[in-house]
Image: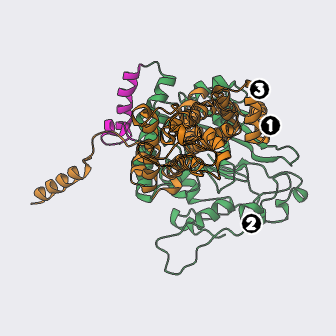
Amino acid sequence: MSSLQGGAPVLEVEDLSVTFQRKGEKPTRAVDGVSFSVAPGETVGLVGESGCGKSVTSLAIMGLLPSRGVKVGGSVRLEGEELIGAGSRKLRSLRGAHMAMVFQDPLSSLNPTVQIGTQVTEVLLEHRDMSKAEAAAEAVTLLDRVGIPDPRRRLKEYPHQLSGGMRQRALIAMALACSPRLLIADEPTTALDVTIQAQILELLKELVVDTGTALVMITHDLGVVAGLCDRVHVMYSGKIIETADRHELFARPRQPYTGGLLASVPRLDAGRGTPLTPIRGSARDAIPWAEGCAFAPRCDNAQDDCLTEVSGSVVPLAYDGPGRELRCRHPLEHPTAPSGATALGAPR
Amino acid sequence: MGDVKRRRIDELAARAGQVPEGEGGVSLTRSAFRRLRRDPVAIIGAVIVVTFLLVALFAPWLAPRDPLAQTLLSQIRPGLIPGSQEGFPLGVDNLGRDLLSRLIYGSRQSLMIGVVSTVLGVAAGMALGIIAGAFGGWVDTVVMRFVDILLSIPGLLMAISISVLLGQNQYALMIAIAVTQVPIFARLLRGSMLVQRGSDYALAARALGIRKRRIVFGHVLPNSLSPVIVQATLSLATAIIEAAALSFLGLGDPDLARPEWGAMLANAQAFLSVRPELAVYPALCIIVVALGFTLLGESLREALDPKFRR
């Protein structure tokens, strides 16, 4: 995979922040100073639990957040072109053509009253200079490429006649119709069962390798991360708290939150009746970043200086070895170079 | 050996993959229609509606007599209006006109007023609903406040004021009834468009860079229509009743000789003690037609609503 990587990054996100402000209410900062970049052919994972801001990040990149009551700050550059503050017409012409998105629920993301074929050709007609007949022929090729058997017949069918995996394939076909440079997949396998999940991930991996598309994978599923992502950003309460290569992250998680996530994955080789090891509390226990580490209330390593009051500064995202960044004052230690298997049971 | 097994499996798989019924997909509308055909209530409603439509269409051939010709005048006396007899299955009215023929011709007026006014009401209501639902924001606010004002005036009062304003003719009557229907359809369509606009597929279409106009008319509108279709069917019943009510109040067709169920009811009022049938038959017609449209509308609702799907 890495052979295709390199060159100028397709997507550069710098200090992105999203604030929801409703009249008469306290503003909520959903995304807070997120920075990352994605190179061609690279797969970057954004990982975190519900409400950590990963989906809002993706909507902000695509320019799909409502304009009223939402403030987006920072910079998002697609192939060097600034998207934040770009006109809606400009954004619309980029969406679908240069950047595309695959959503979580394939059934509700397809229009139930319109034939699959119409929905696929619509994208082609919008962005590519094609006649209806050319678009129809291209649609067959597209469905074929994402592994839908008998594409000619499928094009005439309605979404409810397709299986879940087939629908997600159709949506991927639509997203890839104009060979975008950037594909954002927002939990694309969450609504599918496990065997189909594997197929869809395999398909995405293949397409990324074949086309050199940059892929941003948004997920809460560490299995997906392990199978697909080159680099992983772990998000918590709107901020990136740890960045590492996939192998590094699984072998030596440094943020206690990442360690907790890895430890809480149910293991097939655990004895019967072995309790799961959850992270205590819930995401709602977070404290504002300005006051201290948002994860501190749930963290076993937390000490007094995790609070801004004591340390005098907000916990920074700092260099933590080659290719790694970490936002933590008391990270997990890995004295001996452990194998991935022991790291999963890392002391918490 | 293994090869044979393999071939057998492939063969079975190929057969399972075949689709027996034609090619292409089954649209939601078509499958709704299929469900409708299996629903006895829908069939009863449809039979009633179709029967009345046919009667209205073929009135000149079905009616035994001229609805305007006065006969049996010699038998009519104060306190006596002849009932059923040879050649007059339902008897005659106070002016000696054949009641059955008048009922048959009356279906033309009632159905036409009902259908035309509902079509007008649906068209105007949908236009307002689309404007409000597609643009949102202040356009939505302005349109909906206007609709609220319309809605705050009682339907019959509004219809009466409009027919008074526009003069006493049947076009005024149709417009009057149509206006009372507008707010229902505007609200219904706007509401369901707002829901659909927030749906995942609308977001997905935006994420693919599809034009707003295309999203509104190609995606949002077709998915918002089913409550409107249902309400239109139900509104036909209301429109027919309202048309009858307005004619009963004397706001209908100024040509009193032309048969119309509401006017016939009004006319029969004076003779209720002499011959109540004069009121009963037109009233029955109104009730049965309204019932037919209501049954059809209710089963349409069930057929089109995914939640009712069995």
Q: Chain A is drawn in which colour?
A: green
Q: Which chain carries label 3?
A: B
Q: Mark 1 lies on which chain?
A: B
Name the residue type under label 1: Ile
Question: Residue at left 73%, top 24%?
Answer: B166
Give the foreground label among 1 and 3: 3
Q: What element carries label 2?
A: helix
Residue span colored magenta: A131-157
Name the residue type under label 2: Arg
Check disc 3: other Cα within 10 Å, few if <14, some if 14-19, many if 20+.
few
Chain drawn in orange: B
Q: x, y percentage for residue A213? A: 49, 34
Question: Residue at left 66%, top 26%?
Answer: B169
Q: What element carries label 1?
A: helix
A336, above or below B34, in the image = below
B82, above or below A78, in the image = below
Q: Which residue is more in the foreground, B5 or A111?
A: A111
The reply to whether callout 2 and callout 1 are in contact (CB within 8 Å) is no
> Which residue matches tag 1?
B149
The secondary structure making up most of the magenta span is helix
Question: Does B147 appear in magenta?
Answer: no
Examine the image and state in which quarter residue B123 appears. top right
> Which residue matches tag 3?
B165
